[in-house]
Amino acid sequence: MTAAAGAGGSAVVPTTVEEVVRHRLDSALGGWRGMAESAAPALAFLLAWLWREDLRTAITAAVAVLVVAVVIRLARRETVQHALGGIVAIAIAAAIAARTGRTEDYFLTGILYNAGLAVVFAASMLARWPVLGFLVGSVAGEVTAWRRDPGVVRLCQRVTGVFLAMYLLRVVVQLPLLLAGYTTALAVSKLVLGWPLLVAGVAVIAAILLRGHTPLTDVSALGEDRPEDGPPTGAAAPTRAEP
């Protein structure tokens, strides 16, 4: 961690793009607990379906897990944002499958969802306005300020690329299984390419953020304020505090 001393005390000041983006992503995703709570209803749905192959049982399992997560959050007076994060897509997919009576429609919705995200993420990278930049900006309170720092743009391109690879992998693996009618294999692939793939992707992103040392050329691009008497943007980097 870096620090710069001011007259009234000391203030933490970032010196690398990776340092700040790491904290922004952690805030936006809710850390490991937030990601786990977002994925838990889908995981419960798939496990229940593999166990009973009954759509109603699977939906009940997903709702039960969601209710438990929300109750725990409310009891601890914490935000339920991340607990509710994974239920919208499941609710839509389950409603369509329940209406048509075809379990395959639940998986088709997920494939189309990942394909749509892949298109959006790829287009954002081609335009050099990577989606992850907007995520970082929304947490910082300045949605497009990150564009002022080329280092931030390059880093967000790389992180967005990791998410794009995950979306494409799901589509490439699951679509042929759906077309071939291998429903059980499709459910297993969805299970494997869900939380485990997300953990692997986050590990890759963590490696990028921990190993990189891209200097900030404009701290305000990430919504960080320097102390009034601290070094101005473009000045020599502040010294690192002793651990």
Image (cartoon, helix red, strand yellow):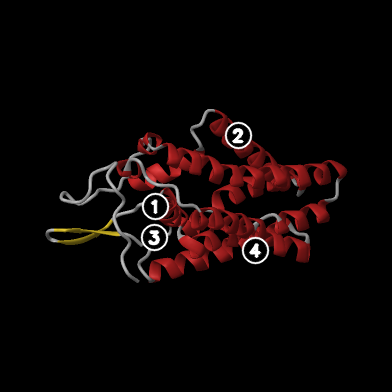
Residue tagged 4: 44
Closer to the camera: disc 1 or disc 2?
A: 1
Q: Secondary structure at mark 2?
A: helix
Dividing the picture into quadrants, the one containing residue 62 is: bottom right
Distance from disc 4 to disc 2, alpha carbons, whole Å, reads: 30 Å
Disc 1 residue crowd, few under 14, some 14–19, many 20+, Cα 10 Å: many
Which tag, 1 or 2, sits closer to the chain's start?
1
Residue depicted at x 44% and y 41%:
151
Q: Is residue 67 visible in the rendered structure shown here?
A: yes
Q: Is residue 103 above or below residue 157?
A: below
Disc 4 residue crowd, few under 14, some 14–19, many 20+, Cα 10 Å: many
Query: Which kind of residue does numbered mark 4 sit on?
Result: Ala
Which tag, 1 or 4, sits closer to the chain's start?
1
Closer to the camera: disc 3 or disc 2?
A: 2
x then y, percent, for residue 49: 74, 60
Closer to the camera: disc 3 or disc 1?
A: 1
Query: Which kind of residue does numbered mark 1 sit on?
Result: Val
Residue tagged 1: 20
Dividing the picture into quadrants, the one containing residue 1 is: bottom left
Distance from disc 1 to disc 4, alpha carbons, whole Å, reads: 34 Å
Q: Which mark is residue 61?
A: none
Q: Is residue 120 above or below residue 34?
A: above
Most distant residue in the left direction: 7
Which tag, 4 or 2, sits closer to the chain's start?
4
x then y, percent, for residue 139: 37, 48
Quick check: marks 1 and 2 in contact, CB under 8 Å? no
Query: Which kind of residue does numbered mark 3 sit on?
Result: Thr
Query: Which kind of residue does numbered mark 2 sit on?
Result: Ala
Residue depicted at x 69% and y 62%:
57
Residue tagged 3: 79
Disc 2 residue crowd, few under 14, some 14–19, many 20+, Cα 10 Å: many
